[in-house]
Structure formats: C-alpha cells, structure tokens
Amino acid sequence: MNFVAMDFETASAKRYSACSLALTIVRNNQVADEFYSLIKPDTEFNWRNVQIHGIHEADVADAPTFPQIWQVINPLFQTNQLIVAHNAPFDNGVLKSCLEHYDLQRTHYLTLDTVRSSRKFFPEFENHKLDTVCNHLGIELNHHHNALDDSLACANILLYEANNFGAEQLKPFVRMIN
C-alpha cells in the first residue's frame, strides 16, 4: 500500500487555526518518510487546545505560516493520492479551512478514516479513539496529540488492517475530497 497519514493540531476551535502538522508517507507497506512542522496560525490560542497538545503561542512564534508549509506539502495531495487520518473529517476539515482562509487553491484527493475502518473491523473495542485502538492492536503511541506520533500511529493502524483483512476490504472506506 502507498498512502500518506495526516494529523493536525489546532490552536483553537477555529478549523483554520492549525498549529502543527505531520505527514507519515507509506510506500510499499513501509514508512518511507515523515514530515512535521509547527505552524504559526492566524489566530490566538485557546487554553483548552493548549491543554490537549501542549503547544503554546510562544512555541510557534518563529514557525512558518500555513501558506509556507503548503508550498512544501502540496505535491502530496493529488487526485489519486490516498490521505489517511484518524477522525478524517476533522483533519480534512482543517486542511480545507486553512486553504480557504489563506485563499489557496482547493485540492482533490482520496481519503480514508481509520476511525470508521476500526469500527468495522474491531466492533468489540470499547471506543475507537486513537490511543484505544493502538492499545488493542499493540501499536506504539508515545505522545498522543503530538501530530507526528499520531500520524505514525494512524499509518500503522491502516497497515495492520490491510495486513489482517486485505486491501480489498479497505476500498469501501475510501472517499474523494473535492
């Protein structure tokens, strides 16, 4: 399988307030590359979000803005590229909101939500939060809500599902983002 696992953290409830982004790139069923960056958002930080991920306004003071990050990662978001996230509606929503907020061209790509796939393959789990799924599957997740650790864990969940249930069983979960 080839795909990119994506995870955003946000500074506030505003979807365009991305303050960190990680991408884990999987080629031929192996983690081939990783991308991580703090992002200086165009909004203030909310204490609730800081409490979750531990990123403070001072941490991103010298970080690149989303448009600067987008110049680097944009080539990964192509029509036939699969972008995976755990709770994909959130992460895809953050990306869409950032593109709209900064007046950047929207992108089209395939997406898969590992929350949905884990609900189907593991209905017996008490919930399908990232840390719960990782614990049940024996997937390492050292720092939950660190975007890089979360994107790597998400990639490993999809690889586990593909190895145990087959890539064909994952196809019904793939959607197009327009």
Image (tube, rainbow, N blue to C red):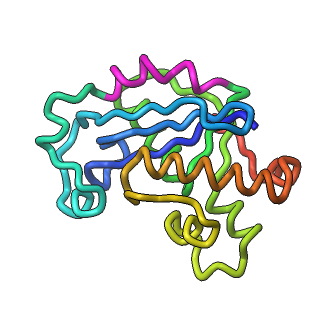
Question: Where is residue 135, by image quadrant?
Answer: bottom right
Q: Residue 160: x and y, percent?
A: 71, 55
Q: Residue 151: x and y, percent?
A: 50, 46
Labels in figure, total? 0
**Most common SS among magenta residues:** helix
Instruction: Judge whether 48 appears above or below 25 on screen.
Output: below
Residue at 58% over, 33% down: 25
Residue at 36% over, 48% down: 9
Q: Residue 143: x and y, percent?
A: 37, 57
Residue 71 within the magenta-colored segment of the rendering:
yes
Image quadrant holding the C terminus, namely top right
Residue 68 shown left or right of residue 32 in the figure: left
Instruction: Judge whether 60 appears above or below 103 on screen.
Output: below
Residue at 50% over, 36% down: 23
Question: Residue 136, can we see it?
Answer: yes
Question: Residue 88, can we see it?
Answer: no
Image quadrant holding the N terminus, namely top right
Foreground pick, 78 / 1: 1
Foreground pick, 148 / 91: 148
Instruction: Judge whether 132 appears above or below 50 on screen.
Output: below
Residue 171 within the magenta-colored segment of the rendering:
no
Question: Where is residue 19, by image quadrant?
Answer: top left
Question: Where is residue 97, by image quadrant?
Answer: top left
Residue at 21% over, 42% down: 43
For the magenta stretch, what is the residue range? 66-78
